[in-house]
């Protein structure tokens, strides 16, 4: 094995480790967000948790993709990945419609959620963790020429930005009693979920250029 191929294999292993970390973090984040969100009646926090569930599934798809590198025929690898991309895209769409319904219902019925200090802590932790994971995945993806890993890093960054919106919404309710901020952030999360559904479905239908990953 040449020095270049050894370095490339090491980078692929790093990408796999980063995906394991991302999945583990999102699973914990999803459980806490959905649990505390349901207790407080916060659609923004529940929606954030549901997004974390989908991010975990997406991370699982990429983890599989990285682990299959060099083990199966390229055509088979690409077909399976596109099927998984479509499944994740549909999941984003279904969750987006759910969060949209809940957010609109809370605004119409003026159903105020309780203030959630645990939710604020979860959002603050993600604001710190997500940019770090984004940078590590982005640099690793660029070094191995993996468009899939680079795209996944962008999703991680958007998750961090979504954490900022969640923190603002929960903070406004906790500090000022502005409960409307919670369903409004739910609408922001809906827009993100719909965008991810569209982008994922569109990318699954695109043909991979010759020589690309």
Image: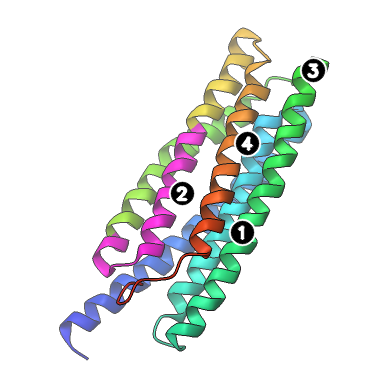
Mark 3 touching mark 4, by CB under 8 A? no
Q: Which badge, 3 or 1, comes first in the chain's sequence?
A: 1
Q: Secondary structure at mark 3?
A: helix
Q: Secondary structure at mark 1?
A: helix
**Residue underneath mark 2:** 155
> Within the magenta stretch, is there residue 159?
yes
On residue 88, which mark appears? 1
Classify 10 Å Cα crowding around label 2: few (below 14), some (14-19), many (20 and above). some
Q: CA distance from mark 2 to mark 3?
A: 31 Å
Quarter of the figure with residue 195:
top right
Along the viewing direction, whichever of 165 and 122 lies nearer the viewer: 165
Provide the residue span drawn in magenta: 140-163
Instruction: Left or right? Give the position of 24 relative to 8.
Output: right
Q: Nearer the viewer, mark 2 or mark 3?
A: 3
Question: Where 111 sits versus 41, above or below?
Answer: above
In the rendered image, residue 128, in percent from the top left (x then y), is placed at 41, 38
Q: Which badge, 3 or 4, comes first in the chain's sequence?
A: 3
Q: CA distance from mark 2 to mark 4?
A: 15 Å
């Amino acid at each position: 094995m040449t020095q270049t191929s050894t370095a490339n294999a090491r980078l692929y292993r790093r990408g796999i480790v980063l995906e394991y970390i991302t999945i583990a973090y999102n699973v914990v984040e999803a459980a806490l967000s959905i649990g505390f969100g349901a207790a407080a009646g916060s659609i923004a926090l529940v929606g954030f948790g549901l997004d974390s569930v989908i991010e975990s599934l997406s991370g699982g798809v990429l983890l599989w993709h990285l682990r299959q590198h060099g083990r199966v025929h390229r055509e088979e690898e690409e077909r399976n990945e596109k099927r998984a991309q479509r499944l994740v895209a549909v999941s984003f769409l279904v969750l987006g419609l759910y969060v949209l319904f809940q957010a609109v219902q809370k605004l119409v019925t003026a159903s105020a959620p309780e203030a959630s200090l645990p939710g604020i802590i979860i959002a603050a932790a993600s604001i710190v963790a997500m940019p770090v994971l984004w940078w590590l995945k982005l640099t690793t993806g660029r070094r191995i020429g993996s468009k899939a890993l680079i795209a996944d890093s962008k999703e991680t960054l958007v998750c961090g930005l979504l954490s900022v919106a969640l923190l603002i919404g929960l903070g406004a309710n906790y500090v000022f009693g502005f409960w409307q901020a919670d369903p409004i952030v739910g609408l922001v999360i809906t827009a993100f979920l719909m965008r991810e559904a569209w982008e994922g479905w569109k990318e699954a239908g695109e043909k991979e250029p010759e020589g690309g990953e």
